């Protein structure tokens, strides 16, 4: 039997999220502490954040992994809850988290939550975006950061349990925002592949994109969403194609520099 209520710090990193940050922080008011790390937003993000917490820290963008690791280091409570600025915690998830922490024994170091995306006027139960389990709640002193940008991950010392209720994820404002993020993320991903020693092969651009489409559209039942499902699954394939095409571009740049200097 626990004799104290577990305390939890919510951490959020953000940049120019005035359209989402209020909804996010409103859903975190129940936490014992909210820490926001902002990358010098130029819109009303910081103004909105200060309505919810006095722990608003401005720091230059250092990449997804390093920025979130820094936010983690600023938390002071026993448990840490990582929430993205375009996410929202439902009342059902809040109650589930409170109950889970109250009953967690020393073997449990983390909890993974599913994410439910809202995009193109619907919730995406099909197409591969759900449940997308990810560790989000973890003991502050038993977690560290791994993975590569933009797919960082939390590594914990101990068991991780799954939660039932999802985080609501308002991932893209519209199609234009979706495409902008694909362009940005594929640039980051290709650089990470090169840094890890990955070499481009024809087969990566030839076979990986259609397999991603088949998995999302057929195996993950994206076809049930009509044309929006086709669009989302097609963009998933384009994401893979661009990631490897940009890796090839990175490999060609030294050759082009050599020719221009000769």
Image (cartoon, rainbow, N blue to C red):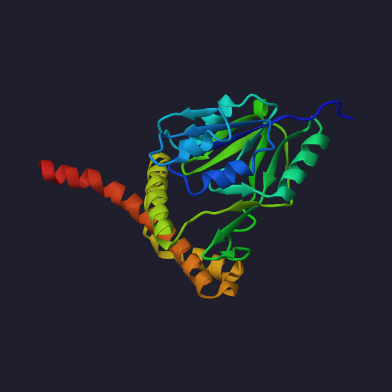
Left or right: 3, with 95 as reference point: right
Residue at image point 43% right, 40% down? 196
Task: Return the x and y of residue 4 as percentages of the image width and height.
Answer: 82, 26
Comparing 192 with 137, the one in front is 137
Residue at image point 61% right, 27% down? 75
Residue at image point 52% right, 36% down? 49
Residue at image point 86% right, 26% down? 3
Quarter of the image holding residue 44?
top left
Does 76 sit above or below residue 249?
above
Q: How many marks?
A: 0
Q: Which quadrant holds the C terminus?
A: top left
Quarter of the image holding residue 128?
bottom right
Comparing 19 with 194, the one in front is 19
Task: Return the x and y of residue 132 as percentages of the image width and height.
Answer: 62, 53
Comparing 81 with 198, the one in front is 81
Outermost residue to the left:
262
Task: Return the x and y of residue 185 as percentages of the image width and height.
Answer: 42, 49
Does 245 sit above or below residue 63?
below
Task: Return the x and y of residue 241 as percentages of the image width and height.
Answer: 40, 60
Left or right: 241, with 75 as reference point: left
């Amino acid at each position: 039997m626990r004799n104290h209520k577990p305390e939890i710090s919510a951490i959020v990193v953000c940049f120019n999220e005035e359209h989402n940050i209020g909804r996010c922080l409103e859903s975190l008011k129940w936490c014992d502490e909210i820490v926001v790390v902002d990358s010098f937003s130029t819109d009303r993000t910081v103004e909105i954040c200060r309505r919810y917490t006095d722990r608003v820290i401005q720091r230059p963008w250092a990449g997804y992994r390093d920025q979130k690791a820094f936010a983690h280091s600023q938390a002071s409570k026993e448990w840490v809850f990582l929430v993205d600025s375009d996410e929202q915690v439902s009342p059902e998830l809040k109650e589930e988290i409170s109950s889970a922490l109250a009953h967690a024994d020393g073997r449990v170091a983390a909890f993974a939550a599913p994410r439910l995306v809202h995009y193109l006027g619907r919730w995406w139960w099909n197409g591969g975006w759900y449940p997308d389990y990810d560790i989000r709640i973890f003991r502050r002193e038993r977690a560290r950061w791994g993975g590569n940008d933009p797919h960082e991950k939390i590594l914990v010392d101990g068991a991780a349990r799954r939660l039932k209720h999802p985080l609501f994820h308002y991932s893209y404002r519209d199609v234009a925002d979706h495409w902008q993020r694909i362009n940005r993320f594929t640039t980051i991903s290709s650089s990470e592949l090169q840094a890890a020693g990955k070499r481009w092969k024809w087969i990566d651009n030839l076979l990986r994109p259609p397999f991603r489409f088949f998995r999302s559209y057929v195996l993950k039942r994206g076809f049930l969403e009509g044309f929006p499902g086709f669009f989302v699954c097609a963009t998933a394939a384009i994401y893979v194609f661009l990631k490897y095409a940009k890796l090839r571009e990175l490999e060609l740049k030294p050759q082009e520099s050599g020719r221009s200097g000769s």
